[in-house]
Amino acid sequence: MAVVVPVLVVVLVLVRVVGDDGGGDDGGTDDGGAVADVSGGAGQQRAEDLPVLPVEVPPPTPEADAACPALMGALPLDLLGEPARLVDSDTPYAAAWGDPAVVLVCGVPQPEGLDAGAGLLQINEVTWFVEQSDEATVWTAVDRAVFVRVTLPPDVDSAPVTVLSDVLADTLPPR
């Protein structure tokens, strides 16, 4: 039994280091105890197999620079079975999972169609404004220190937003 524990620790460290998507330094933030999936399922695509995803982001504001790092450091490496993937953006405030990608951008402007009370849904203590089109469903958290946009492919339900709502509620103060 004494040999199993050190080997297990080494394997977990290697999974954490090698499995890191290189998307940045964890800055010592708590990732909620997320552990990489090492089951090696044959049908699951690995993050390094996915191409880098270009993501347009707005110029960072002082509010985004103050609030977004905590959120970005707490995002999961795996979102409902979809691996995090590398993004190419002008700020570190973008993240994506899977293919077709679920994309999160922190520090976006207020949605143009936002009207007090219309089109708002609350999920796990976060208020979202939802816009649908044939190309995507765009969810924008409108009650946090900064606006956060999550773009879902048209055939994906709200499950990713439910998971991400918990992370937003834990890391971004309400306004």
Image (cartoon, rainbow, N blue to C red):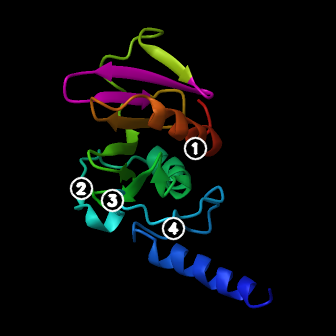
Give the alpha-carbon distance from disc 3 to disc 2, as whole Å.
15 Å
Is 17 rendered above or below residue 107? below
Looking at marks 4 and 3 on the same chain, the residue that comes earlier in the sequence is marked by: 4
Local secondary structure at mark 3: loop
Residue 53 is marked as 2
Residue 172 in view (yes/no): no
**Secondary structure state at the residue bearing disc 1:** helix
Marks 1 and 4, Cα distance to the nearest angstrom? 23 Å
The one nearer the camera, 131 or 97, is 97
Residue pointed to by mark 3: 45
Q: Find out whether residue 126 is within the magenta segment.
A: yes
Towards the viewer: 158 or 128: 158
Mark 2: few, some, or many residues within 10 Å (few <14, many ≥20)? some
The 10 Å Cα crowd at callout 4, few under 14, some 14 to 19, many 20 or more, is few
Q: Give the residues in magenta.
A: 123-140
Does residue 112 sit above or below 30 in this rendering?
Answer: above
Residue 137 percent coordinates (x, y): 31, 27
Q: Name the residue under label 1.
A: 167
Name the amino acid, label 2.
Answer: Leu
Residue at (46%, 72%) from the top-left corner? 19
